[in-house]
Amino acid sequence: MSDPAMQTIHRDPALFYWILIPITIVMILTGVLRHYATVLLATTPKKLTLPALREQRSLLRGINLRNNSSAISTSSFNTRRDYLVSAYKDGTFLKDPENRGKPQGNPMTDPAAMEGMMGMMKGNMAMMIPQTVIMSWINAFFAGFVIMKLPFPLTIRFKSMLQSGVMTRDLDVRWVSSLSWYFLNLFGLQSVFIFILGNDNAANQMAQQMSQMNPSAAGQMFQPGQDPDKAFLNEAENLEVLEHECILNGVEERLLASLKAG
Amino acid sequence: MALSVSQQLQRFLRDNAATGALGYPIPFLSTPESGDVWMEHEKLLVSCLRTGDDKGAFLCLERLIGRFGATNERVMGLRGLYQEALAEDETALKQVLREYDDILAGDVTNTPIAKRRIALLCTLNRSSEAIEALNELLESSPTDIEAWAELADLYAARGLFSQAIFCLEEVLLVAPNAWNVHARLGELLYILGSTGNNVHQATVDAIGRFCRSVELCNDYLRGYYGLKMASDRLLSLLDSGSRQTQAPHNAEGRQLSVQCVRQLNEQATLKLAEATRDRTGDEQNRNELVAATRLLSKGDETRVR
């Protein structure tokens, strides 16, 4: 490889005005448009019916009882545990008790689950379509241009990142191709979007990826396709084996000790 | 407190006039919208109603409706609150109640309205209906601690202390470190002890609850007050009990040594004396401080005699 300092490419300044700046502006505009498109496409989450609400919160009650059992006395705990365990086992809290024991249907047929999947699809589409369109646009118009030189040296590893679309072995890593400029923009405009659109904008890819990782975090206890009856039986088992220890045991001595120490 | 808040109304509304009312779709030119602003609108609405500034409350409500729409559950609840506050007589309140019933007939899962309805039933002195409605609400959402706490208060007001204790325990299962709930539970146990037959056990439990509340929140006046009351009673019980029969030993009931109770009593007295001495300027807790002073002077009198 030749001495990087010696490499000079005489670029037409028009490259700068007609490629670098347009790509940047187009990227920013797509981000903004995507934000508004996602906002428009977003459907409000469907409200749960009362039995579904009851099902979820009853399970939550059991979990709370298990986690915070130390706050109440042993006799109170035993009463609650006996009640919840028998109710869980009988399926009292189930949304549709007659469906109990039957295998879960295909989640595709459940309209509520479909709704959720549609929402996710819409989000993904709003993400993917602009990306595909713009990338093919750039590929078609600007492929193979070297448009800018970074003012600092980089190691050879960055070559594939910065010079995609330019098939030269000897070109210094500091030169950036147009397609790479697109990728840099795609991943590097996060802070610009935060500045323009506010913190929780939909153009922010990171947030979207995070929410895809963990879709159940948003209030939904049961994922589509999961059998609530199984969850209840599980929780009943957890409660049955729990060893109860009341926090009030020895609280007087603890308090006295801390008061003396303080 | 509420007065000083509601007096800031004009300034607050002016400062936040731009929020939400987006004339142009370029977000970075306008003030960023945050959830806090709307929480503040809500708080302002409530304190306006408390201070009788109905006009200010209306402005806040209008803003909230403008932002979230009149069909938002939370906004519906606040609107109901506003209407209740403006209702002049019982017939107007009943009209509001009918509206709530209509809304709930359309959508049973509207929790804010269901809660408003319960509060309104309490206002109309129909507490048995309120208890019924609360039980219904808790049947479908048993993790709602607000509702459990309200139900506990209603039960306690009717003298059903063991039910009230059950409700407060439910609250503790969701918020195990709420020291005020621990103290309240202690108070209920103390009262239960003064009505029921198992005085000894209830008092010991009450002492445990008060100790826990003080352990969670240092210098919690109410906790120490209760601790002193309960330990006083337990000491007198132990005094009389030692002459008659020993306190009943049930299997899981906790027992306290006389020495321990005495120490707790001393500490509580000490802390109360400290609080009444140091916190004289504390406006918020003045009633509690007065009560503490009275309790201390009563204790002194008995000792002198």
Image (spheres, coloured by chain):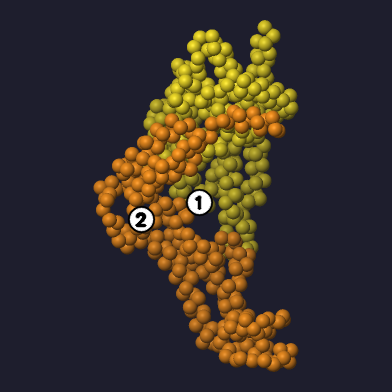
- Residue B19's place in the image compared with B195, above or below, is below
In this rendering, do the residues under marks 2 and 1 share a single chain?
no
Residue B94 in the figure: left or right of residue A18 = left
Q: Chain of mark 1?
A: B
Residue A176 visible to an observer of this rendering? yes
Query: Which residue is painted at 66% across and 21% down in the image?
Result: B266
Residue nearer the viewer, B252 or B85: B252
Query: Which residue is painted at 40% across and 27% down in the image?
Result: B128
The kind of secondary structure element at disc 2 is loop
- Residue B38's place in the image compared with B254, above or below, is below
Q: Chain of mark 2?
A: A
The residue wearing badge 2 is A226
Question: On residue A257, which mark appears?
Answer: none
Residue A60 in the figure: left or right of residue A3 = left
Residue B152 in the figure: left or right of residue A178 = left
The kind of secondary structure element at disc 1 is helix
Residue B121 visible to an observer of this rendering? no
Which quarter shows the C terminus of chain A?
Answer: top right
Residue nearer the viewer, A15 or B277: B277
Where residue A204 appears, x then y in whole percent? Answer: 55, 66
Where residue B65 appears, x then y in whole percent? Answer: 51, 48
Question: Could you say which quadrant of the image residue B291 lies in?
Answer: top right
The residue wearing badge 1 is B68
Query: Which residue is painted at 45% across and 61% down in the image?
Result: A42
Give me the C-alpha separation between circle 2 and circle 1.
34 Å
Where residue A233 appears, x then y in whole percent? Answer: 35, 47
Q: Which chain is yellow?
A: B
Q: Colour of chain A?
A: orange
Q: Amino acid at mark 1?
A: Phe
Q: How many numbered tags mark residues here?
A: 2
Between label 2 and label 1, give the one nearer the viewer. 2
